[in-house]
Image (tube, grey):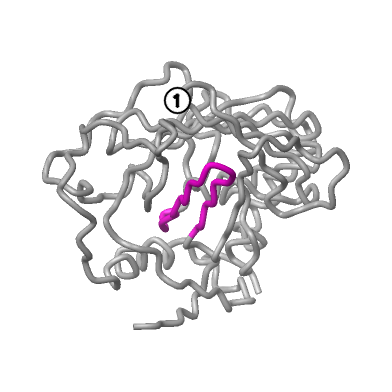
Amino acid sequence: MHRRLKAAAGSIGIIVATTALLSAQWPQYPAGPPVPATGPTPRTADGKPDLSGVWRNVRNPVAPARGAAPAPPLVSLDQVPEATFGNVGSGFKDGLPLQPWAAELVKKRMADNSKDNPDANCLPMGFMQFHDHPQLRKIIQTPKVVVIMYEANYGLRQIFTDGRPLPKDPDPWWYGYSVGRWEGDTLVVQTTGFADDTIWLDVRGDPLTSAAKVTERFRRPNYGSLEIEVTVDDTKAYTRPWTVLVKQRPVETELNEFICEEKDASHYVGVKK
């Protein structure tokens, strides 16, 4: 059934509450013989790990994909804090290493109850919000490009793996320009060319500026695990580069159409009108 969702996307509670409902709309479709979550990493015809599939964050309860075996522990990356949707720097003892102006900006955004967050206003979200969003994402991998489709706000990224370099002076894009290369079983993605200095990385408002270079390392150590190690090098907003980890699991479902039409963020709890 074709459905159109009119979402008050600014309410994080609404997003989380509706995720389970949305993911249940597609009927189950057999994807092949059951594969335990602890099974071997699937591979493409050229021998690369196959990142394709629909993925959900580990923190949300999900059934193991294609089998009854419980999901295995993810490979441990020592000293790499795990990112969260609401606060990317929650795993750091002293928070993210913000420049003074950026720290003041975060305080202001939090004082405003994050009412200007792009997720509250039907606008494209920042890298970490998409990676850590409770809604699903789908990866389609080909030899020359990897496409990530995010259910949240209908986000779309293209990661070119055909050997092209990053553009030197590109027009600014919301998600920047991404190129990837394989280092063994790890897909290393570098992204630059972000739109402006107002990008939100999380709900509380940690920023990303046009000076940023983001490096993502995608690993699929077994059938039921995906790890994305993200390093942000943005000297304009931060005093040093920092790295966080995102963990995801495959799910046997499909993305749902998510059309965000809410333009008024006044429904945020505590917002003064």
Per the image, label 1 sits on a secondary structure element best described as loop
Magenta includes 140? yes
- Identify which residue, 187 or 45, lies in the foreground: 45
Q: Is residue 257 above or below residue 225?
A: below
Q: Which residue has dot 1 on it?
A: 185
Q: Is residue 247 left or right of residue 228?
A: left
Q: Is residue 259 above or below residue 60?
A: below
Give the position of the C terminus as an image quadrant: bottom right
Q: Is residue 15 above or below residue 34?
A: below
x, y percent for residue 270 = 55, 65
Image point (23%, 48%), residue name: 65
Which is the main secondary structure of the residues drawn in magenta? strand
Amino acid marked by disc 1: Asp
Magenta includes 219? no
Image point (68%, 35%), residue name: 163
> Few, some or many C-alpha atoms within 10 Å of disc 1 (few <14, some 14-19, many ≥20)?
some
- Identify which residue, 42 or 150, lies in the foreground: 42
Determine the residue located farthest toward the left in the rendered image: 68
x, y percent for residue 144 = 59, 44
- Point out the stretch of residues depicted in magenta: 134-150
Image point (55%, 74%), residue name: 260
Image point (78%, 52%), residue name: 195
Determine the residue located farthest toward the right in the rendered image: 169
x, y percent for residue 196 = 80, 50
x, y percent for residue 45 = 40, 38
- Identify which residue, 30 or 152, lies in the foreground: 30
Give the position of the N terminus as an image quadrant: bottom left
Quarter of image, res 236: top right
Total marks shown come to: 1
Determine the residue located farthest toward the top in the rendered image: 78
Quarter of image, res 21: bottom left
